[in-house]
Amino acid sequence: MIETSEKYFAQARQVIAGGVNSPVRAWQAVGGDPLFVSEARGSKIYDAAGREYIDFVLSWGPMILGHAHPDVIDSICRTARKGTSFGAPTEAETQIAQLIGSAIPSMELIRMTSSGTEATMTAIRLARGYTGRNMIVKFDGCYHGHADSLLVQAGSGVATLGIPGSPGVPDCLAELTVSLPYNDTDTVNSAIGRYGSQVAAIIVEPVAGNMGVVGPEDGFLATLRELTAKHGIVLIFDEVITGFRFAFGGYQDINGIKPDLTCLGKIIGGGLPVGALGGKKEIMAALAPAGDVYQAGTLSGNPLAVNAGLATLQLLQKKAASYAQLDLQAQHLCREIEKLFFAKSIPVCINRFHSMFTIFFQAGPVKNYRDAKKSDTDLFARFFHGMIKEGIWLAPSQFEAIFISFAHTDADIARTLEACAAALNNL
Ligand code: KE4
């Protein structure tokens, strides 16, 4: 089982940078060689040797219906037989834009892209073009894809100019981004007081999933909304993870705070390459070809991704009332996991938001990235491998989210709890 993946990884490293096409898949945060996958169906995923696991990564969020949902696969197959890409508009793109706009009314106009990164990269360029300003405000621990201006970490002092989060990001560009502590309204107030008239956009994950799951404290998002409205700053909600994850719409449709622009990805593509940005008409109208802010993409709005996304969203629309069931399943799982860790006197802080959660290996609370980084990542790594051994596939990093799908059964949850007990006994 493991040998097969080891062999595949050794071969991959000969021809693929780092052996993977996205860094987190290399399991560097947990050690050991990554498992290669052969297929997945429903809540299950199978490694290269055919061993079955209950999957809680769900391709980092998209597979909320479970893997290989027959209606989604049928839609992809029917579409593929009519051709896979035309580089010309199709009616289906209008249909998915209409459906997304009906679910998330703040997205008055939409532009499809092929990834979440393209969506957020375009959103900040659009905000800069629309306002004529250059500065961006983001939050420590929030990840918005790998566009240069967003691969920036907090400067030496709070609310100081950003420093590159990666080699290759020029200092002069990083300095245009300020990264602030998440949930810290005082610091946001002072930063906007200091830079307000230079700031084009504040971009935020309304529920953070990339430092592990960290929800917004009361008043945090409302403060961002007030400050951006007051200073003519574009408020961007990065809902690449949260879009259609908690309800048939965005988190914004639950908490009532409407951004100026929203970025989506993952779920709206049903597992195919996708992203989207959308928002106020007067801002989106600045995008080429109607406006002058340039953005383009050979495969943007691609028939396969759009029809896989349409099939997914249409199924989710029918299940709109069932999201509560997903939440109850996640609530039960988290409550029982907490009991298992408590019985072993291992401190954990489980942050859950509807059907996504993170088990932080610390007593908590975890309200921002500084808190999250206090976690015992070595113990997390040992737990991760213990759960893999028990047939449970978790995200290979303490700072990611665990997702539940509509395909996860009560038996899957019960099996996961048995596995957790066994993994803790061997920790
Ligand atoms: P993509 O370019 O990966 O489609 O989307 C970037 C992105 C934007 N915004 C948020 C809130 C995101 O979470 C992401 C991507 N998420 C990561 C994992 N949390 C994708 C996994 C990976 O990088 O391999």
Image (tube, rainbow, N blue to C red):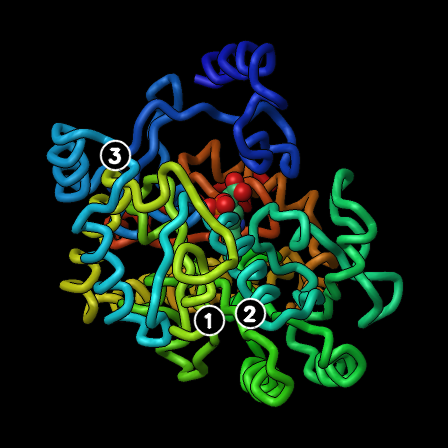
Q: Position of residue 326 (x, y in %)?
A: 29, 63
**Mark before the other along the chain sequence, 1 or 2:** 2
User: Closest to the observer: 143 or 279?
Assistant: 279
**Cα–Cα span, label 2 and label 3:** 30 Å
Q: Which residue is mark 1?
A: 283
At x 40% / y 84%, what residue is drawn?
A: 256
Q: Is residue 200 above or below residue 399?
A: below
Q: Which mark is residue 130?
A: 2
What's the residue type where badge 1 is placed? Ile
User: Closest to the observer: 165 or 380?
Assistant: 165
At x 21% / y 57%, what residue is drawn?
A: 94
What's the residue type where badge 2 is placed? Tyr
Q: Is residue 272 visible?
A: yes
Dividing the picture into quarters, in which one does residue 211 lie? bottom right
CB under 8 Å between callouts 1 and 3? no
User: Closest to the observer: 149 or 289?
Assistant: 289
Q: The residue tagged with tag 2: helix, strand or loop?
A: helix
Q: Which residue is mark 3?
A: 86
Q: Is residue 343 visible?
A: no
User: Closest to the observer: 55 or 183?
Assistant: 183
Q: Is residue 32 above or below residue 224?
A: above
Dividing the picture into quarters, in which one does residue 304 lie? top left
Q: Quadrant of the C terminus?
A: top right
Crowding near the residue tagged with mark 1, few <14, some 14–19, many ≥20 C-alpha atoms within 10 Å: many
Q: Quadrant of the N terminus?
A: top left
CB under 8 Å between callouts 1 and 2? yes
**Mark before the other along the chain sequence, 2 or 3:** 3
What number of labels is visible?
3
Q: Position of residue 112 (x, y in %)?
A: 36, 52
**Cα–Cα span, label 1 and label 2:** 6 Å
What's the residue type where badge 3 is placed? Phe
